[in-house]
């Protein structure tokens, strides 16, 4: 291909940078995932022996303008974040147009397709699921019943119900503030393929409730306190309601490479290659491999899930800070490996402030950090939609203009 350009989207899942203009509607006034982590680190409140200590140490992200993007969102610098006089990346703060603060909405919008309709949600009080839905689920799957039927943390519920699940053979079904039906089952006792089968059945059953995702949550362990979720999670999403950047690129004959759960989020649509990996380190290793091999005109799209599932939802500030610092170290290798014509965008799909109450996502601005060998740093200001990311990449990669978003190029 004559086009000597490639693009990379690196999603730091849940790294919001300050409360969005409409945060009050979501009960998220004052949320700031990145800023609050930086403040906790600066105060010595994220020091853990053998893990990390002191102020947040992320020179590469700061050089690209993450601190400046945080300033755009919140209006001041958090404690522990100093002004960067000459950022080397384009930096901005994107607000969200989509109606929710969920994973599919955030990803689809950054790919140029805001979700302007309302997803269906299950009750936050038990029982969470309509009785007719559970009756159909039990009948069509053949399970002896279900456990849970509530709004819950995915790790806490394993300790509460994991042993009973192993004795009874009943899957653990629960929801969250997202539009989601989650099913946890023991990978060995219940069986991984069996779990996937009942999740496929659940996916069909929840369509009438307009639910965004069914998530298979396999786990292992023998007793309470030892249960751990495995890397064989599977998200079964409803397909995007229109064309995304991925569809446009694929139609134009380009390579669209998913790393991690991107394929699941887009219902496996608009992709030419899917790479599975578990954990941020493995995800970045696969991304670095694609940086070496991806053809001209390609898009490589990676979701770094650990920030959200392991630390944001679990309200683990120190763990989140450590993960950002490790990401920053590998980011140096990625930057060094970029070639002429490459651009990369670091962003997020929502917030998940680990200092907030509860365990849910938070409605926040997300960073828009664009960099590459030929990019000159400057402020992009506040952006009205995550869709500006997709539109910018459509313009840069010279494919058809998307319906939503404004290009920064």
Image (spheres, helix red, strand yellow):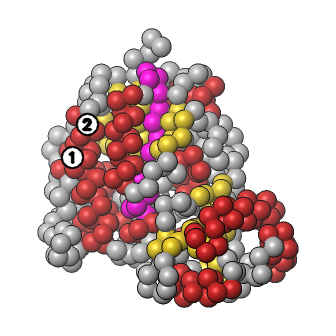
x, y percent for residue 29: 44, 72
Residue at the (30%, 69%) spot, across then down: 319
Residue 405 is left or right of residue 66, and the answer is: right
Disc 1 secondary structure class: helix
Q: Secondary structure at mark 2?
A: helix
Q: Which mark is residue 32?
A: none
At 66% across and 54% down in the image, what residue appears? 237
C-alpha distance separating marks 2 and 1: 9 Å
In this view, which residue lies farthest toward the top?
A: 2
Residue 372: quarter of image: top left
Residue at image position (57%, 87%) is: 163
The percent position of residue 14, horizontal first and vertical second, equals: 43, 60
Q: Nearer the viewer, residue 407 or 300?
A: 300
Q: Earlier in the sequence, mark 2 or mark 1?
A: 1
- Residues at marks 2 and 1 touching, judged by CB atoms closer than 8 Å: yes
User: If the image is split into quadrants, where does the C terminus sit?
Assistant: top left
Q: Label 1, on which residue?
A: 60
Q: Which residue is mark 2?
A: 335
Q: Is residue 406 above or below residue 221?
A: above
Q: At 53% across and 81% down in the image, what residue appears?
A: 158
């Amino acid at each position: 291909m004559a086009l000597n350009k490639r693009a990379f989207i690196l999603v730091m899942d849940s790294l919001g940078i300050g409360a969005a203009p409409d945060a009050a509607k979501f009960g998220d006034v004052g949320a700031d995932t990145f800023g609050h982590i930086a403040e906790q680190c600066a105060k010595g409140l994220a020091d853990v022996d053998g893990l990390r200590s002191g102020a947040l140490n992320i020179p590469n992200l700061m050089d690209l303008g993450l601190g400046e993007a945080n300033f755009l969102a919140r209006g001041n610098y958090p404690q522990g974040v100093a002004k960067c006089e000459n950022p080397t990346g384009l930096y901005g703060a994107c607000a969200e147009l989509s109606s929710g603060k969920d994973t599919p909405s955030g990803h689809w919008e950054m790919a140029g397709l805001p979700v302007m309709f309302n997803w269906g949600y299950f009750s936050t009080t038990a029982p969470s699921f309509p009785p007719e839905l559970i009756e159909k689920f039990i009948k069509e799957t053949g399970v002896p019943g279900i456990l849970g039927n509530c709004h819950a943390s995915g790790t806490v519920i394993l300790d509460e119900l994991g042993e009973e699940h192993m004795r009874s053979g009943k899957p653990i079904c629960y929801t969250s503030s997202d539009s989601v039906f989650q099913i946890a089952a023991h990978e060995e006792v219940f069986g991984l393929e069996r779990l996937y089968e009942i999740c496929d059945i659940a996916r069909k059953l929840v369509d009438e409730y307009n639910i965004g995702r069914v998530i298979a949550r396999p786990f292992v362990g023998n007793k309470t306190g030892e249960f751990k979720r495995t890397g064989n999670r599977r998200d079964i999403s409803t397909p995007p309601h229109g064309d995304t950047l991925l569809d446009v690129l694929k139609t134009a004959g380009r390579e669209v490479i998913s790393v991690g759960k991107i394929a699941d989020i887009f219902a496996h649509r608009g992709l030419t290659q899917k790479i599975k990996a578990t954990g941020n380190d493995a995800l970045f290793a696969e991304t670095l491999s694609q940086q070496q091999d991806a053809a001209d005109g390609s898009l490589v799209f990676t979701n770094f899930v650990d920030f959200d599932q392991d630390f944001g939802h679990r309200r683990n500030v120190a763990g989140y800070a450590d993960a950002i610092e490790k990401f920053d170290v590998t980011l140096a290798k990625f930057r060094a490996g970029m070639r002429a014509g490459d651009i990369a965008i670091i962003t997020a799909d929502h917030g998940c402030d680990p200092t907030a109450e509860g365990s849910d996502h938070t409605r926040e601005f997300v960073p828009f950090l664009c960099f590459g060998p030929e990019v000159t740093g400057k402020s992009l200001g506040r952006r009205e939609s995550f869709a500006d990311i997709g539109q910018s990449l459509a313009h840069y990669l010279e494919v058809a203009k998307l319906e939503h978003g404004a290009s920064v190029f």
